[in-house]
């Protein structure tokens, strides 16, 4: 099957998913003019999303939160219109596990009328990784990106051999199906330490949910914070911290139990 364009969609608060999705897109080998990026990380995403045409291949990437696709990504995807496209599904996780995330993404894709062609789980630096407690630090690295490009090449090969989207069998993926109830995150949220904050506003720009506002100081609406750590990583003064009695322990445990390098897994 010939595809006219590759329409890449990603939700990526700390930018690791973005790196993987665009590396996969590059590997497909289509004219760069027809390689489109749709970043739906920020609240104004709806103004920038390009229309999807029936002959486009769609790549959708989002991070894994508590073994599922981040809920903000799912909610935003459900607002989008697709055109019965072939789709590549990508979950990026922080070297613990992706659990049911690919099934989560597959089910949403099907409900949106998409035809899953291939899927993959790649590793990105964990949102909770710090200098003292590194978790998958620096990933995706050059080796991950090489594997993402090679996955793109395999997708191109599969497309060349495919006669029609109707010929595709259900994409079998690891995880629990039917999906169990979604785990609840928190209660926790990120906050600003006023003694460290220089009021540059980088945290507000980085926040994917508009949770940070300015009123004499940068503050957070706790219910809007999805714990993505985009603000924590964007703050050069380390003035943004997650207010939670559990996170420091979770971070320390993860840096010990998830120290072994996990490799990307592809399903095609
Ligand atoms: C609230 C939350 C929950 C997470 N849960 C998991 C998880 O269950 N398994 C895992 O390996 N990584 C987990 N991570 C790490 C992210 O999946 C990982 O850092 C990913 O690369 C972030 O993608 P992004 O850079 O595109 O935002 C979690 C991160 C956050 C913020």
Image: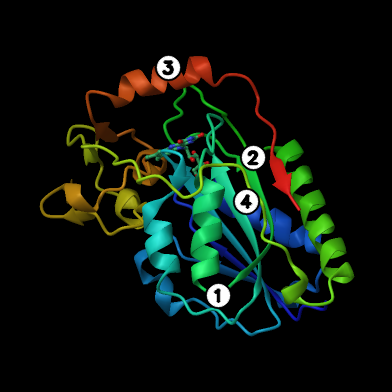
Find the distance from the CA under tag 2 to the CA under tag 3. 21 Å
**Residue tagged 2:** 140
Q: Residue furthest left?
A: 216
Q: Nearer the viewer, mark 4 or mark 1?
A: 1
Please provide percent x and percent y for residue 161.
89, 68
Find the distance from the CA under tag 3 to the CA under tag 4. 26 Å
Residue at image position (78%, 44%) is 146
Q: In which quadrant will I find the N terminus?
A: bottom right
* Label at residue 19: 4
Find the distance from the CA under tag 4 to the CA under tag 1. 26 Å
| Image-based side of 163 in relation to 242, left or right | right
Mark 4, other Cα within 10 Å: few <14 / some 14–19 / many ≥20? many
Q: Is residue 15 visible?
A: no
Please provide percent x and percent y for residue 116.
65, 64
* Label at residue 253: 3
Q: Are marks 2 and 4 in contact (CB under 8 Å)?
A: yes
For mark 2, give the secondary structure.
loop
Ranked by sequence position, the earlier of labels 2 and 3 is 2
| Image-based side of 256 in relation to 153, left or right | left
**In the depicted view, which residue is nearer to us: 52 or 143?**
52
**Residue tagged 1:** 113
């Amino acid at each position: 099957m010939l595809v006219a364009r590759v329409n890449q969609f990603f939700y990526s608060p700390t930018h690791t998913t973005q790196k993987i999705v665009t590396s996969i897109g590059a590997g497909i080998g289509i004219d760069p003019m027809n390689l489109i990026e749709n970043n739906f990380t920020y609240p104004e995403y709806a103004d920038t999303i390009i229309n999807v045409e029936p002959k486009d291949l769609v790549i959708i990437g989002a991070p894994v939160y508590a073994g599922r696709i981040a809920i903000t990504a799912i909610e935003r995807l459900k607002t989008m219109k697709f055109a019965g496209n072939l789709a590549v599904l990508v979950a990026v996780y922080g070297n613990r596990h992706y659990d049911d995330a690919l099934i989560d993404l597959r089910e949403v894709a099907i409900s949106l009328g998409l035809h899953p062609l291939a899927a993959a789980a790649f590793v990105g630096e964990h949102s909770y990784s710090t200098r003292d407690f590194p978790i998958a630090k620096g990933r995706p690295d050059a080796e991950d990106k090489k594997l993402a490009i090679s996955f793109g090449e395999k997708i191109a090969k599969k497309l060349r051999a495919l006669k029609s989207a109707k010929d595709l069998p259900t994409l079998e993926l690891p995880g629990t199906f039917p999906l169990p109830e979604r785990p609840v995150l928190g209660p926790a949220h990120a906050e600003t330490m006023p003694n460290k904050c220089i009021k540059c506003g980088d945290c507000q720009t980085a926040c994917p949910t508009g949770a940070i506002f300015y009123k004499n100081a940068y503050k957070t609406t706790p219910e809007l914070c999805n714990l993505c750590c985009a603000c924590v990583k964007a703050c050069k003064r380390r003035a943004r911290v997650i207010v939670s009695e559990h996170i420091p322990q979770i971070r320390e445990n993860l840096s010990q139990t998830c120290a072994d390098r996990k490799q990307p897994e592809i399903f095609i």
